[in-house]
Image (spheres, coloured by chain):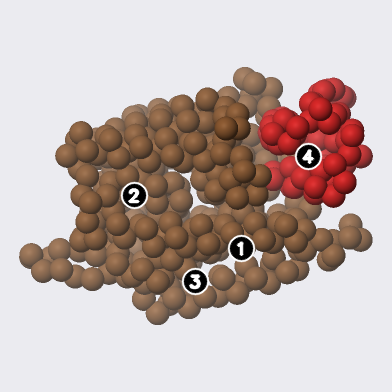
Chain colours: A brown, B red
């Protein structure tokens, strides 16, 4: 058995416990954390999209970034760097978001859904793994977005500064923001609890390098199960926690904020997995890297926020199944979402091909 | 020598893996510039039968010397 850094599963345990607490205190079902959903909520709260049910400034996101910043500063690991294909990373951030929102969750929420017994997430897991395998094949063929370089320290504080601005707006002038009065955006834990949970997870994830996509990638490429141990720890903690709390629903029936469109869940998460490998990490990891001063990851996160807005403005996001007056109302991915995911997969193919080693040898 | 400065993970590990798989060199020098890459390359090297000496350099850079055990 190869060596595993104990901090990785410990981080996974804390993520799982925090997710259980946040759902208990008000977050939507199986959505203690969801980087895609929460960035989408922030996008809506800022008025970038007008899906009334998903608008809120999620303090979890603010905490994740600032927790990583504080830990990186304390550990002398805060480094302002940028310049590794920022425009392509912006596009890739948007692609990952469109894919994840078709499925209704980022890779982290996929694990939380599985831990809640949501069998429909298995299609997403299968797609995520397949997407990662395609991404790994690209890496083996020499895919690279190129080198990043040192930049001025101020550049590294762009996303942490943006997060502080969001917190100030939320607490001091919420009237300039949009807030859901019903739907997932209206379901949230108290802001201070969400912020503290985010800070704790952000700090630990910075130190442990936790990454959902990286876990499967490293296991496949290097037979290294270090990061995958965090993935497993989250699943086990959430599974046991949901069993104890009576929230485990091992069914393919109506699950919280989920749908039965298996093919498009598969393809959406395939795009999210492939894109995450090209970016070097899942959406959670991008937040953490941006908190450490990585300007390329900050651009990626901004791409995700814009991608979320486009996903909702163009009707590409998945619709959750629902029970209305005792009747099942099927959700799923509508035609615009199917076209969007197909376009994203085509773009991933183009970006992958354009950045293979042969194309970069004159750098 | 492998210069993986400025490259994000997993690229530094991929470069080391390719070099190790190509001709299993007795020693290999790797230049890195972030702690995460140092950890990942060190773990990969240890798992591949190499000992690792880490030499921090100026400008937040690191020179790793991998030696086949």
User: Disc 3 sits on a residue from what chain?
Assistant: A
* Front disc: 2 or 3: 2
1 and 3 marks on the same chain: yes
Q: Is residue A265 above or below residue B9?
A: below
Work out whether mark 1 precedes mark 2 in sequence or the reverse, and give the earlier one.
Answer: 2
| Residue A177 appears anywhere in the view | no
Q: CA distance from mark 1 to mark 2?
A: 23 Å
Work out whether mark 1 precedes mark 4 in sequence or the reverse, and give the earlier one.
Answer: 1
**Left or right of A254 on screen, residue A15:** right
* Front disc: 4 or 2: 2
Work out whether mark 2 precedes mark 3 in sequence or the reverse, and give the earlier one.
Answer: 2
| Residue A231 appears anywhere in the view | yes
* Residue situated in front as seen by the camera: A289 or A352: A352
Q: Which residue is mark 2?
A: A114
Which residue is at a point 28% across and 53% down the rendered structure image? A118
Q: Which residue is mark 3?
A: A341
* Residue B48, horizontal then vertical, whole percent: 73, 36
Dots 1 and 4: beta carbons under 8 Å? Answer: no
Which residue is at a point 19% across and 35% down the rendered structure image? A245
The furthest residue to the top: A74
Which residue is at a point 43% across and 56% down the rendered structure image? A125
| Mark 1 surroundings within 10 Å by alpha-carbon count, few (fewer than 14), some (14 through 19), many (20 or more) | many
Screen quadrant of the C terminus of chain B? top right
Q: Which residue is mark 1?
A: A134
SS at circle 1: helix
SS at circle 4: loop
């Amino acid at each position: 058995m190869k060596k595993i850094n104990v901090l990785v599963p410990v981080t996974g345990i804390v993520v799982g416990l925090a997710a259980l607490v946040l759902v208990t205190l008000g977050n939507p079902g199986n959505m203690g954390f969801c980087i895609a959903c929460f960035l989408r909520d922030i996008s809506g709260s800022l008025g970038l999209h007008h899906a009334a049910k998903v608008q809120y400034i999620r303090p979890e996101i603010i905490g994740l970034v600032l927790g990583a910043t504080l830990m990186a500063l304390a550990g002398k690991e805060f480094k302002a760097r940028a310049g590794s294909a920022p425009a392509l990373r912006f596009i890739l951030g948007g692609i990952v978001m469109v894919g994840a929102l078709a499925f209704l969750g980022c890779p982290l929420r996929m694990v939380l859904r599985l831990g809640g017994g949501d069998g429909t997430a298995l299609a997403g897991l299968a797609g995520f793994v397949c997407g990662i395998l395609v991404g790994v094949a690209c890496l083996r063929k020499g895919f690279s977005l190129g080198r990043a370089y040192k930049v001025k320290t101020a550049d590294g504080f762009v996303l942490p500064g943006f997060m502080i601005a969001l917190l100030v707006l939320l607490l001091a002038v919420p009237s300039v923001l949009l807030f859901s009065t019903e739907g997932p955006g209206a379901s949230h834990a108290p802001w201070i609890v969400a912020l503290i949970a985010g800070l704790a997870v952000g700090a630990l994830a910075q130190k442990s390098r936790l990454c959902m996509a990286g876990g499967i990638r490293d296991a496949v490429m290097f037979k290294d199960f270090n990061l995958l141990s965090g993935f497993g720890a989250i699943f086990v903690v959430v599974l046991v926690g949901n069993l104890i709390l009576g929230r485990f629903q091992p069914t393919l029936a109506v699950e919280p904020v989920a749908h039965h469109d298996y093919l498009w869940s598969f393809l959406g998460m395939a795009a999210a997995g492939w894109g995450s490998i090209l970016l070097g990490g899942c959406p959670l990891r991008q937040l953490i890297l941006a908190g450490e001063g990585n300007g390329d990851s900050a651009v990626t996160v901004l791409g995700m926020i814009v991608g979320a807005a486009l996903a909702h403005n163009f009707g590409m996001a998945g619709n959750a199944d629902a029970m209305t007056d005792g009747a099942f109302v099927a959700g799923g991915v509508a035609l615009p979402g199917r076209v969007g995911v197909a376009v994203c997969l085509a773009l991933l193919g183009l970006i992958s091909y354009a950045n293979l080693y042969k194309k970069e040898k004159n750098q | 020598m492998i210069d993986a400065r400025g490259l994000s993970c997993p690229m530094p590990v991929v470069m080391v893996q390719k070099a190790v798989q190509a001709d299993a060199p007795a020693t290999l020098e790797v230049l890195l510039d972030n702690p995460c890459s140092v950890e990942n390359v060190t773990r990969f090297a240890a798992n591949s039968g190499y000992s690792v000496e880490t030499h921090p350099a100026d400008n937040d850079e690191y020179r790793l010397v991998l030696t086949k055990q």
